[in-house]
Amino acid sequence: MPIKPADIQAAAARWRLPIATPIAEKLAVYGDMLLRWNSRLALTSIRDEAALIERHLMEGLFAAVHLPAQVASALDFGSGTGIPGIPIALYRTDVRVTLAESQRKKAAFLQEASRLLGLRCVVHAERAETLPAESFGAVCMRAVDKTDEMLPEAIRLLEPHGVLCLMFGRHSPELGPEWEWSRFELPGSHGRVLHIGRRS
């Protein structure tokens, strides 16, 4: 069954996330597109509509809602299916979003999703490490392979007063005393947390 905007709005209410109807409509379109492409390309192991809403769309919306207001540009590092980059682009139209994804099929999906949704996202179809240093006000990472090894690259890509937005377990990464962290637990996630870090 297709994902309906009402499904998105109901989930957002459970997560206590504010969402306007036009955003719910576009998230529903995006979710349906992800399910269609997933049947051919295996973009994600999640194939159930309800689980996709919770584990992908709501997690992406959660990151968008909690992204600091001063952020003007954001990188979704190892974007994969576009979470959280695409929800950020939908929710925060003031933010210039770059989706970095080196796998060709996933990058093609991101290009088509951006076109279909009318987003201004830039799809960087190479590894994020090839981007220039200090290019982004925020770097977001979720389900990135070898996260600990990639964190120095994420930091390199941050502007001097930029923020790291990391979605994983309860403990903030150990990057030294110069980093200050805010923690936002994801509703119903059993231990998954959005960590937002700033240099002190």
Image (cartoon, rainbow, N blue to C red):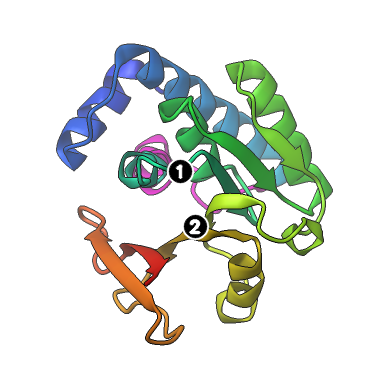
Q: Which corner quadrant holds the N terminus?
A: top left
Q: Quadrant of the C terminus?
A: bottom left
User: In the rendering, at what x and y percent does residue 59 appear?
Assistant: 37, 47
- Name the chief secondary structure element in magenta: helix
As drawn, the label of residue 170 is none
- Nearer to the camera, 42 or 140: 140
Query: At 69% across and 20% down in the image, what residue appears?
Result: 115
Instruction: Check disc 1 and report its element: helix, strand or loop.
Output: loop
**Three-letter amino acid code of the residue under disc 2:** Gly
User: Callout 1, which amino acid?
Assistant: Val
Which is nearer the eye, 121 or 13? Answer: 121
Q: Position of residue 34 (x, y in %)?
A: 58, 34
Regarding mark 2 in the picture, which secondary structure is present there? Answer: strand
Q: Residue at x 20, y 41 (%)?
A: 15
Q: Tell me if 37 is positioned left or right of 173 in this view.
A: right
Q: Residues within 10 Å of mark 1 (few under 14, many from 20)?
A: some
> Which portion, as a residue range, is magenta?
42-59
Q: Quadrant of the rendered structure where residue 195 is?
A: bottom left
Q: Which residue is mark 2?
A: 162
Side of 166 relative to 40 (left or right): left
| 162 lies left or right of 167 | right
Q: Is residue 2 visible?
A: no
Say if 91 sits above or below 153 in the image. above
Give the residue displayed 66% in from the left and 58% down from the top: 134
When the figure is inspected, residue 137 is found, relative to residue 49, above or below; the finding is below
CB within 8 Å, label 1 to label 2: yes
Query: Is residue 5 depicted above or below 139 in this figure?
Result: above
User: Which of the two labelled residues, at mark 1 and mark 2, occupies the earlier sequence position?
Assistant: 1
Q: Tell me the residue that label 1 is attached to.
A: 71
